[in-house]
Amino acid sequence: MTTQFAHYKHFLIEAGTTWIQSQRDIYYGRGKPLSKSEIEVLKNFFNADILKAVRICPVSKIENPAFLNDLKQMGLPVSFNFSDSLGITFLETIVVATPKLHDFHWMSLLFHECIHVMQYTLLGLSGFVERYVEGLVSNDFIYNEISLEKDAYFIQNRFDENPDLPFSVLDVLSSRLQQRGWDEVKVHDI
Ligand SMILES: [Zn+2]
């Protein structure tokens, strides 16, 4: 584990938190609730409160945050580009790039993003951002090494392998968080 980027943590946490909150406020009102058929599938994995809170907002392209350029100018090896993403989750608001969706399994993407909603509820916005930033700076900004993403892909894969076998995302996520020594797991309002 490297710590060469540790002194950027504070900046990243501040900038990330402001960005997530502002994007959530922009997109929440434009979003729509999950459909009946989506809830029918997801209710075998997520609690009803989460599914009721989720909003889906389609966009033509996901915008990068303005601070991404600042990071590059600071010399950080930022290789990720949000505008290449299919989906991104700001608290309970899931923004999806519809032109990129044609070839993609929608329920799989939706499942992944709902896991992020659950992470926000377990950790709170500040806890989510702190852990996301920690994952970035201690892994040289390699997206796939971020523990919150590893958890999301691990759980998503379990769904992909057998979408008919119910399990509790809350339980799996809580135990994975606790295994990493995070003992403050509790449900937050978002
Ligand atoms: Zn993700």
Image (tube, rainbow, N blue to C red):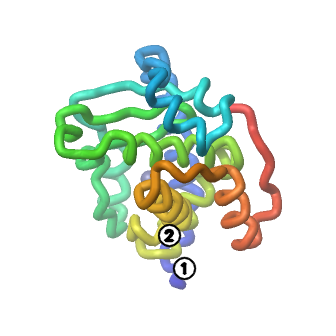
Q: CA distance from mark 1 to mark 2?
A: 7 Å
Neighbour tally class for label 2: few under 14, some 14-19, many 20 plus, Cα within 10 Å: many
Taking depth in this image into account, of 178 and 43 the one nearest to the observer is 43
Residue 39, horizontal then vertical, whole percent: 52, 29
Question: Which residue does the image show at 49% across and 49% down from the upper left?
Answer: 164
Circles 1 and 2 in contact, beta carbons < 8 Å:
yes
Point out residue 6 in the picture as x, y percentages from the top left corner: 55, 71
Q: Is residue 173 left or right of residue 72?
A: right
Residue 170, position in %: x, y?
A: 68, 50
Q: In the picture provided, is 98 more to the left or to the right than 180?
A: left
Residue located beneath label 2 in the image = 137
- From the viewer's perspective, is 190 left or right of 41? right
In terms of sequence position, does the residue under pointer 1 or pointer 2 come before the other? 1
- Specify the amino acid type for callout 1: Thr
Viewer can see residue 8: no
Q: Secondary structure at mark 2?
A: helix
Q: Nearer the viewer, residue 35 or 15?
A: 35
Find disc 1 in the rendering and name its residue. Answer: 3
Residue shown at 28% from the left, 53% from the top? 81
- Image quarter for residue 45? top right
Quadrant (top left/top right/bottom left/bottom right) for the C terminus: top right
Of residue 105 and residue 178, the one placed in the foreground of this image is 105
Q: Is mark 1 within 8 Å of ligand 1?
A: no
Asked if 48 appears above or below 5 in the picture, the reply is above
Q: Is the residue 106 above or below the residue 68 in the image?
A: above
Q: Residue 2, can we see it? A: yes
**Front residue of this view, candidates 32 and 188:** 32
- Residue 88 vs 148, above or below: the answer is above
Question: Which quadrant of the rendered structure holds the N terminus?
Answer: bottom right
Which circle marks residue 122 in the picture? none
Name the residue type under label 2: Val
